[in-house]
Every structure is written in structure tokens, then in C-alpha cells.
Amino acid sequence: MNWPQLLVTVLTLGSIFGVVTLSLNLQYARGGMINFGIVAYFAVGAYTYAIFTQPPPQGLDQYKFGFGWPWWAAVIVAGLAALVFAAVTGWPTLRLRGEYLALTTFAFAEVFHSVLLNERRIGNGTVGLARVERPFGDWGPIEEKYVFAGAAALLLVATLVVFRRLLVSPYGRALDAIRDDETAAMAAGKPAQQMRRQVFLISAVPVGFAGAVYAMFTTLAQPSLFTAEVTFIVWIALVLGGERSVYGVVLGTLGLVFFEEIVRAWPFETVRSAQIAAAVEHVVTGLVFIAVLRYQPFQAAATRLRASR
Amino acid sequence: MTLPGGANALNGVLLEARHISKRFSGLQAVGGANGLSFSVDRGAFVGLIGPNGAGKSTTFDLMSGVQTSDTGSVLFNGHDITRSSTDTIAEKGIGRTFQTPRAFESLTVLQNVVAGATSPGESLRWAFGRSWRSHETATVEAAEAILRRVGLHERAAARVGDLSGGELRMLEVARQLVRDPTVLLLDEPTAGVHPGLQERLAQLLQDLHRDGVTLVVVEHNLHFLLALADHVLVLADGELLAQGPPADIRADPVVIAAYLGDGDVA
Ligand SMILES: Nc1ncnc2c1ncn2[C@@H]1O[C@H](COP(=O)(O)OP(=O)(O)OP(=O)(O)O)[C@@H](O)[C@H]1O
Ligand SMILES: [Mg+2]
């Protein structure tokens, strides 16, 4: 097995999805909002990045819009697009609580997915946009894939730092108060509605960034990449890592991605054994989840990390 | 001449209910036929009494924006707050506690009180900076002083889940005190609080009254309340049955018949 390659992939994908899980953690564990449509914000980031970086259409190109912007400008626009999308989707839904919000956001994401599938001119339907380029080349002796993994990790760390800064402030404490008892928090002057909306919007921005980086990684923005499965994976990572700790969330995501990649990369001798392994994977995945939820190793590691800080 | 409410009693109306009412699926909880009207003078210590289900807690809800009155209006300092949200009303200076104590369970006792105050670091604009830190230090000190005042200072580091019912009640009072409210609405503050702590609470309320804080207190413990209040409102079936100084209320035959029963209270 090619371990360096595997680790680089895990670091890259783990960082990208780690950003999404962190945002979900902010929304859920601190904001008390269940967002089962997080993939839509991720997709908005990816598509926006693709649209803004791809060259204007010519000849046989099916798509109508391409702006040929530099990568960094497109990344910023991807974050803003996710923010706008959050504002539009949050406005009617955030009045809803708990499972109602979960259902509505899920429905939103499904609608958005089918729009992506059927809409031809902007996102090019099922085919998607395939002219996404990776912006980083080799850096001297450092290969491009390492540079890219480093950039993804940097985005993760930046998100972590910004969120932590917010959460250790009185703002974070007010969010905790609102989540614990909204009426009591309001009686203590906390504008619960407004703060919840802010959290929903703020947390969408890094998801948009992550979507852009994901589009760079896959060099593709395609509906099949943005199914509800993405939502489930980040939710599982959130639960694995322990919703109360940002470090646990990051470790949980990295752990989950590592597990998936190792199963994918295992060098099977025969086709038959690969088929068996594929079948066993689901069973093993289930068992690992049960074990992780029972023993919570990521949460424990996160607690140690926090204690040693 | 010294009035029972001190000189403040002369300063006019602070909080006023005009024909407010609330109906819950066929049940008129507050308001009766004409709506409920009463006023609270600045600096007054008002007792609000009445049988179970009289509408006392609902009246608090209507004045604090937890629920919105079906009719009429609530005025604070002459401003209409009938439809204002609970947090804006709190920011204007109306503090309240709840009949069933509420607390932020993920925070410690001290943090619960600190979270009661409004900090500049609670706005998104300042949260990322450092300027809120000095404010924070002052709030923590104030919160510690208040915990001492309500007798909870030894429990400062405890989780609220470890507090007794009576301690939770005092914590809720503390969380409002740190906000320096102009008027404080307390819903049954002595319920489940042991006599020693009740005495401390009585002392605290007297001190607040002396400092000019306007108080409206719902109580079934009339021994406690009638000894402290300088004005009493009696509510029955959502309507104002009587009002006046404690001595008159004790002697009022209508009140005795409707609420006090055999008249040997207090
Ligand atoms: N949210 C609600 N939904 C339906 N009915 C309600 C609601 N809140 C209060 N009520 C009813 O309204 C009436 C007044 O209730 P309220 O709690 O204001 O009485 P109270 O005077 O505070 O009584 P207690 O002394 O028992 O606390 C009661 O009959 C109660 O059952
Ligand atoms: Mg009540």
C-alpha cells in the first residue's frame, strides 16, 4: 500500500470535510440548529468556484457562464455565495425548531440537488463543470499534492482558530445560554433569533470555502459529488468526534476519512476478495461506529488536548 | 413625613398595564371582561397575590414579552412595550424570574450570573477583539459579589445541575441582579427556599427597595410578602379583585372571602 499517498489524501479530504464538520458543530452544538442540508452550501461553494474560474464558453461548451477569475478571488466569491445562500434558505426556515428545521433543510438540499441535475446552462446538468483547475503547482521541491494538502489543512486551522475565538468570547457564552434555555436567555437580554441567524450565516462561509477547495481537489463540480451522503458523512463525523469539542470534531472527521480511504486503497489480490471486502466494509463500518460511540476515543483525545493546552 | 415606599413613591408611574388580556384556547387566563389594568409606581414594592390559576404568572409573561397580550397595552416609562421581544424588554430594564426556575445548565453557577449581564463581547462586531475583556473582569467581580449576597458564593464553581431547587431560585435572582434592573418581577421567590435563606431574601429585597429598585413580587407566602410590600394587588380569575396597602388587604372582606379564607394569615 502506498502510505504517503494515502496520508496525503486523508489530510486533504479530512481537512476539507473537517471544515464542514466544524461549521456543522457551530450550528448544532452551539446554535442548537439541526442542518440536514449542509451539502447544499458545500455544493454552492464548489459550483461558484468552478463558474468563476472556468474560461468563458466557446465552441462546443455547454455552459453559459465562465469568468476566468484568479483562484483566490473565486474562493472569496464561493464563501460569499454560501453566505447568500444561507441568508436565502435561513430566512424562511430558522423560525422552525429541532426536527422541523432538520426536515426543511434536508428538503432544501434535495431540491437544490435536483436543480443541479436538471439545469443545463449554468451548472451543465448531470455532467457538471469539468474545467476546474488546481491553482497550485509544485513549490520548488515540494510536489503539488503536498502543497494542496497543506492549503486544505491551512483552511481547516484558520476555521478552527476563528471559531474558537468566537466561542470563547461572551458571544459564545450567550450562544450556550440560548441553547440551554432560550426564554431565560432572552430574559437576560440575549437576542436569540438574531444570534441564531448570525451563526447560521457565519458558519456557511467556511463551508463555501471548503466547497471551492473540494472542486479544486476533484477538478470537478458535478451533482453526483453533492448527494445527501455528504451530509450524512459530516454528521457521522460530528457525532464520532463528540459535538461538544471542536478538536474532537476535527479528529473525528480525520478518523472517518482515514478509515474510508484505507478500505478504498487496500491492495486486494483478486477481484473476488475485493468484492468480499466491499461487502464487509459496510459491516465493519457499522461495527467501528458502534465501538467509537461506545468508547469515544476522539472525545477522550480531544479532552487531553484541551487539558494540555 | 416618610411614606412606606420612601420618597420614590412620589415619582409617578413606571410600569402600567392597560386592559391587557390573554386567552388560552377558551380559557380567559388574564383580563376578564374589561382587560386587566394596574400601575406600578417607580420605586414601589408591589405584592401580587391571588389563588392558583388567577393569572399572576401569565401577567408577568405579558409584561416581559414572553407572551403577547391579546388586547390593550403595556407601558414602561411611558413607552409601549406590548409587542416588544423579551430581550428588548430585558435590555430596557425589566428583569424577571420564572415560577419554575430556569438556568443555563452547561455553565457553572458563576458563569450563569456572568451570562446574565450584557457584555459588549456579545455582539459579533466586538467578539473577535479583546476590548470586552476589561468589561468581563468587572462583570465577574460583580457576579461574585452578588453570589455572596444571595448566599451562593460557595457554590460558584458548581454545575447548576448540582444545585437544589431553592438554590436555583436564588441563582435566578442573582442572574437578574447582575443586570441592574430598574424593575424586578419575581415569581414566587420563596417557594422551596428554606427559612434561613428566606430571611436572607427578605433582607435582599429590602435592600433593593431602599436602593430604589422597583419590585413586583408574586407570592403565596403572605407572611413573607405582606411584611415587605407597600402595595398589594389581588388577582382572581384574571381580574383585579382589590388593591391597597397590606393592612387594608388583610382586612378587606372581599379578599378574605375570595382568597384569604378564614382570615388568620399574616
Ligand atoms: N401556556 C398556557 N396554555 C394554556 N393555559 C395556560 C397557559 N399558561 C397558563 N395557563 C392557564 O391560565 C391560567 C392562569 O395561569 P397562571 O400560571 O398565570 O396562574 P398563576 O396565578 O400564576 O397560578 P399559580 O399560583 O398556580 O402559579 C391557569 O388556569 C393556567 O392553567
Ligand atoms: Mg404562577
Image: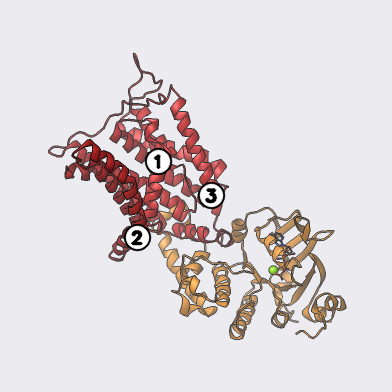
Give the colour of chain A.
Answer: red
Q: Nearer the viewer, residue A301 or A211?
A: A301
Mark 1 closeness class: few <14, some 14–19, many ≥20 residues within 10 Å: few
Q: Is residue A96 left or right of residue B26?
A: left
In the rendered image, which residue does mark 3 sit on?
A: A99
Q: CA distance from mark 2 to mark 3?
A: 25 Å
Pointers 3 and 1 within a single chain? yes
Q: Which residue is mark 1?
A: A229
**Residue at the outermost right position:** B253
Graded by Cα atoms within 10 Å as few (under 14), some (14 to 19) or many (20 or more), the crowding at tag 3 reads few
- For disc 2, the marked residue is A296
Mark 2 or mark 3, earlier in chain: 3
- In percent of width and height, residue B222 lies at 73, 80
Report ligand 2 position as a quadrant. Answer: bottom right
The quarter of the displayed image where residue A6 is located: top left
Which residue ends up furthest to the front in the rendered image?
A: A272
Chain drawn in orange: B
Mark 2 falls within which chain?
A
Residue B259: image location, x then y, percent? 80, 76
Q: How many angstroms separate mark 2 from mark 1 (CA)?
A: 23 Å
Few, some or many residues within 10 Å of mark 2 (<14, 14–19, 20+): some
Give the secondary structure at mark 1. Answer: helix
Q: Are marks 2 and 1 on the same chain?
A: yes
Q: Amino acid at mark 1?
A: Glu
Judged left or right of residue B103, residue B205 is right
